[in-house]
Amino acid sequence: MSTQNNKLNIKTAKDIQDASLIIDADVVVIGSGAGGAINAYELAKQGKKVVVLEAGPYVPSSEFKEMMAVAMGSLYQDEGGQSNTHGDVTVLQGACVGGSTVVNAALCFRTPDYFLNLWKAEHGLVNLTPELMSGYFDKVEKNLSIEPNAKHETSIGANLILNGLNKLAIEPGVAKRNIRDCAMSGFCFSGCKTDRKQSMLVTYLPWACNHGAEIYADTRVIRINTANGQASGVQAEVVDPKTKVVKAQVTVNAPIVVLAAGPIQSPIILQKSGIANSSGQVGKNFACHPSLSVTAMFDKEVNDFHGATHSLYVDTHTLPEEGGYILLNAVQEPVEASFQAEPGTGKNYVAYMEKYRNSIRLITLVHDENVGEVRFKDGVKEILYEVDDHDFEAMKAGLKFNARILFASGASFLYLPTSDRTVINSVDEIDSVIDQLKNEPARYRYTSFHPQGTCRMGADPANSVVNPYGESHDVKKLYISDASLLPTSIGYNPSETVYALSSYIADEIIKANFS
Amino acid sequence: MKDLMISRRHFIKKTAMIAAAITALPVVNAVAGVLTDESRMDDLERAVFAKMLKIALPTEGSTLIDPATLPVLPTIEGALLAGMEPHIRQGLRGGINYFNEGAIKAFGDRFVNLSDVDAVRFVDQWSASAAPPERALSMGLKKLTVLAYWAIPNTWGPLGYDGPVSDKWNLPSLGNTPEPKI
């Protein structure tokens, strides 16, 4: 029965007084991001008692500061410092109630049929047909107000880039975003203070609570329990977010476990639990869409501070056969701008930052091979990932494409995001400068917002972790529902894929267990 | 000799990991953790960061705010080091020491003792180095220093950057979205 209070029913560490807590539920959901929230809502709506455990803190949107430096410390995994072992790919994920949906750019793409067909052919996902997925895309697009950007929903920098695209006769894409009445602040990555972005914090989580779901923030799952080959609940700890001291032990007894902690934490929880890995694939096949941002300097002030965080993309080369890269504009505040370009140390750096208001940037994001691994070793999380040589060539092609667009947009020169000063002064220099780049660790300033693939879905238990319906091959009634599932990277922002897949998995859970 | 080589390989591997950890150092945590004795800067770290701040942001003659007038080092310590995982914090200490000593080979003295001109040359040399740990350390320590500066809102005025806007623009919250009817 729905209460329609439409508010979060949430407890945080400061609400927990007892040293141990035992909760009985029908379903325990690990993680409150896209996968967790959607499952929590769909399953609670069936009248089931649902408990959601979120390792991150609860930060109400009214407390969002619209400053990346603050948001990183309060809303992101490892305070924004999560990276691969080389330290040259920053892997950004939300770690708060609402998960990455709170801090993503709200950019939405349907999974291309190309990948659905590939997954069918190579991973046996015959169920995920374009026709079936279309219904789920329709559903989540309606629920999350996923609409094409209106003409006014753009930014100064995006408009300059659009001029460049027009000059070069390159067809721009119009971004779709899960936004209602965008306020154009440009602070998507810091959390939407005025609740325009349709994150889980303001949609599926309160909706789940309308149907009795309970959310525990600051609550870190340490093990999934099993009995007789099937899931039976979880062990967790309530951790004071300030002192990191464990305040309480939590046991949730539940016959259905939905693991939706994200592509880094989900495999680690499985590894800590010692389950679901007869294939040896838990944590393997990690991909992350590494991206590099080219900074363009103009002779005039641009003031590309606000507007839609992303409003413009070009996907003419996105599919692997077409190049494997996508282009995205982005507004950027000074903290990010301060280390995303390398003008050299000292006076050159000061001169660069003095001209911050003359700068815009264009991101190249590549569809990458699933060459990485996430593992828990000696008590420490490790993301083993190096940009593949083939992917690096795609990146170089994307950087060249972007550089031409930026010069056509009026840029006077460009900074590449390298460890040492690399500048392109004219169109004529583009090829020679970029051709010299080598695929080396700690040479580039990669960012990734899209970890994927560490518990991949497939029909064959020998080479996948979950079956085509989201259930672990090894442990019955243990479902996984986040971007861990993706058998390959998809080259586009994966959020809508996760929204749709999670809706599908929730329906499969209902069909298998509640019908 | 064999032990020495093993030890050296171990050290280089460890240094690479430390450098990597530093490159990925988190952005300033304004909701800082508790600053413990273990996470506080020691004298060497304070000297290295002070030197890096001086050479990375020579604001004299520019429109930028002089970093000496801002609490940049306390921001590094209180907002960043305090929340750092212990193994990362331990690695940072080793990395800073390695970086400081690294200047001896090319410039004859530790980083903290170099002239500002040589210190800039050293940082740029390591940024362009063929050795990944050197690139990572140079890039990481500079990043850490400058982002602590730019995280202080007083620094934004000369850039023309206006910072947070929702309150300034009087934007109302739309609140939680109503549950779908079906």
Image (tube, rainbow, N blue to C red):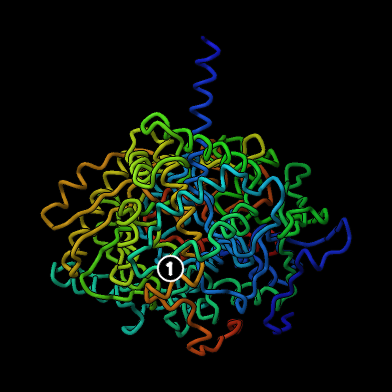
Which quadrant does the C terminus of chain A fall into?
Answer: bottom right
- Residue A54 image offset from top left, x and y in percent: 68, 61
Near-viewer residue (A45 or A275):
A275
Q: Is residue B105 left or right of residue A416?
A: right
Label 1: which secondary element: loop
Q: Is residue A123 left or right of residue A164?
A: right
The residue that label 1 is drawn on is: B65
Q: Is residue B64 visible?
A: yes
- Residue B108 image offset from top left, x and y in percent: 40, 31
Q: Amino acid at mark 1?
A: Ile
Give the number of callouts.
Answer: 1
- Residue A241 image offset from top left, x and y in percent: 71, 60
Q: Is residue A311 left or right of residue A189?
A: left
* Crowdedness near tag 1: few (<14), some (14–19) or many (≥20) residues, C-alpha within 10 Å: some
Identify the residue at image location x=79%, y=53%: A246
Q: Is residue A369 above or below residue A94?
A: above
Q: Is residue A284 visible?
A: no
Q: Is residue B83 left or right of residue B28?
A: right
Near-viewer residue (A16 or A73):
A73
Q: Is residue A348 above or below residue B98?
A: below
Identify the residue at image location x=29%, y=73%: A158
